[in-house]
Image (cartoon, coloured by chain):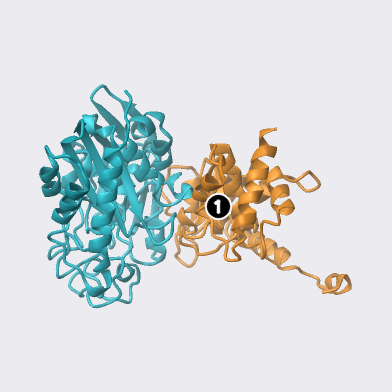
Amino acid sequence: MSSGDADTVAVTRRDFLRSAAASSAAAWPVSAASTGTSGPVRASDPAGNLRATVALRINEQDHVLSVDPRTTLLDAIRDHAGLTGTKKGCGHGQCGACTVHMDGLRVLSCLMFATMAEGRQITTIEGLCHPGETVHPMQQSFIDCDAFQCGYCTPGQIMSAIACVREGHASSDEQIREYMSGNLCRCAAYPNIVAAIRQAARDMER
Amino acid sequence: MDRFEFHRAKDPADAFRWSEASRERTGGGSYIAGGTNLVDYMTLDVMRPSVLIDINDLRHAYGRIERMSDRLRLGALVRMSEAEDDPVIHRDCPVLHQSLAQAASRQIRNVASLGGNVLQRTRCEYFRETSWPCNKRNPGSGCAALGGVCRQHAVLGTSEHCIAAYAGDFGQALIALDATLETLDGSSGRRRRMPFADLHRLPGDSPHLETTLHPGELITFIEVPMAPWLYRSRYIKIRDRQSYQFALASAAVALDMDGETVREARIALGGVTTVPWRAREAEAYLRGKALDEAAAAEAARIAFSTARAQPQNAFKVILGQRTLIRALRETAQIEIGR
């Protein structure tokens, strides 16, 4: 696609998702009675579906979301908070694409309900650096080492890799492979991912 | 996924109140801690609780690792990765550390609780997929694994109603080490202690009944006695891929040696069994013997003497024995300096 074509596309997929998320959040007003972290979730929407009000702190910003209690943290991050950097791969905890940090630990956002993440600090790939800032050493290292092909697993790989280094589990290629085994890459960029983590581990120490 | 109510319990009494109130509801209630198994099974409609009771705020009471003089006391809400990283467990209890470090992925271990881990359900393909008959998921509907695709299934502890394998690793270490559970009864709130070996039920003719816990009963602590064999212990896990995979066969071994001679042996088997599995006859055989290749092979033969395999998983009888032989031989060679 040429740059001229791109200019004619009025709404990008990302913009569409962002506006859809905003409208779905606005469609259901938050009532004071249904807020609070430990209270029962009994409020229903007009269709009779149970609703839960969830206060999530994502990338140091507060998001108050009205969601179906069945909403996973992953879907809340993507579809309700509008942060689409975190990817949905399998939805069953088998691929690691949805990896985010919760209170500094890497976790799978598809395997917990959003309601369970209240009061916790969530960091997604968007939280690693602000627009215009220098990217995180791990992001730069993935670029330098060509550690991806299609890029779909990359946000999860990078979030997992940063935690892997911080945990002290990046001391050898063997250890990196073991502690990154929860992140699958269908393009099989594994050798480059290991190289990127090795390089970033040195950069993050400085 | 079915609709459910979500409650966040402040303390055990709070959890028991919600549990009690949900008992008569369709689908009943379920505690949720890490949720790594439960959420997956809820998205697949395999488990359908109508009330979820989040017990993570009980971590202040059940989230600590304590090293006592005679035992290790693990809160049931300790995360798998916390126990994996604990320096005392790493140094003094290799089989516990290794069984945790080789389970799932680091992301899953960061949220999965120890109490939830021992209660995880089988990953039998027919249990996971609701369109198939399954006596465990839908009592009386039959077992699709018998005569079906059953390469991953159990060869020990099976029945004509169920051959689903127990998926955990930590449970094998716990049963080998004579661990004890402490629970709180959901109705009376009373404390109860039981051997970990009494937690799981063999499938028999009621594979849907998996544990001996009462409705609403909550595991609060797991205790491991600091026995002499703990220091010379090992967990070996054999899988289709090297990491992030359930066991085809595994062995948890702990030995107390007098020179070359076995004083006490503790052996548990995984991947090949329907529940955490202690190989007591094999242990008894090894007592007082030198642990050479022949003795290890005979112990492994004894451990699998009651195995009943299907054509597709017959290889597990051999693989399981080889796994145990290797575990015994490698454990005997561990140098311990105390």
Relative to the observer, which residue lies in front, A83 or B269?
B269
Q: Which residue is mark 1?
A: A99
Quadrant position of residue B225: top left
Q: Position of residue B153 (x, y in %)?
A: 27, 65
Q: Amino acid at mark 1?
A: Thr
- Quadrant (top left, top right, bottom left, bottom right) of the C terminus of chain B: top left
Q: Position of residue B129 (x, y in %)?
A: 35, 71
Q: What colour denotes chain B?
A: cyan
Q: Position of residue A79 (x, y in %)?
A: 60, 60
Q: Count the marks.
A: 1
Q: Is residue B325 above or below residue B263?
A: below
The chain that appears orange in the image is: A
Q: Chain of mark 1?
A: A
Relative to the observer, which residue lies in front, B146 or B230?
B230
Left-right relation of B223 to A150: left
Q: Residue placed farthest to the right in the image?
A: A4
Relative to the observer, which residue lies in front, A89 or B250?
B250
Local crowd at mark 1 within 10 Å, few (<14), some, or many (≥20)? many
- Quadrant (top left, top right, bottom left, bottom right) of the N terminus of chain B: bottom left
Relative to the observer, which residue lies in front, B66 or A201?
A201
Q: Tell me what residue is drawn at x 42 percent, y 64 percent.
A: B43
Q: Tell me what residue is drawn at x 34 percent, y 37 percent.
A: B94
Q: Is residue B311 above or below residue A116?
A: below
Left-right relation of A51 to B281: right
Q: Position of residue B105 (x, y in %)?
A: 45, 51
Q: Quick check: can you spot residue B126?
A: yes
Q: Quick check: can you spot residue B182?
A: no
**Which secondary structure, mark 1?**
strand
Left-right relation of B328 to B284: right
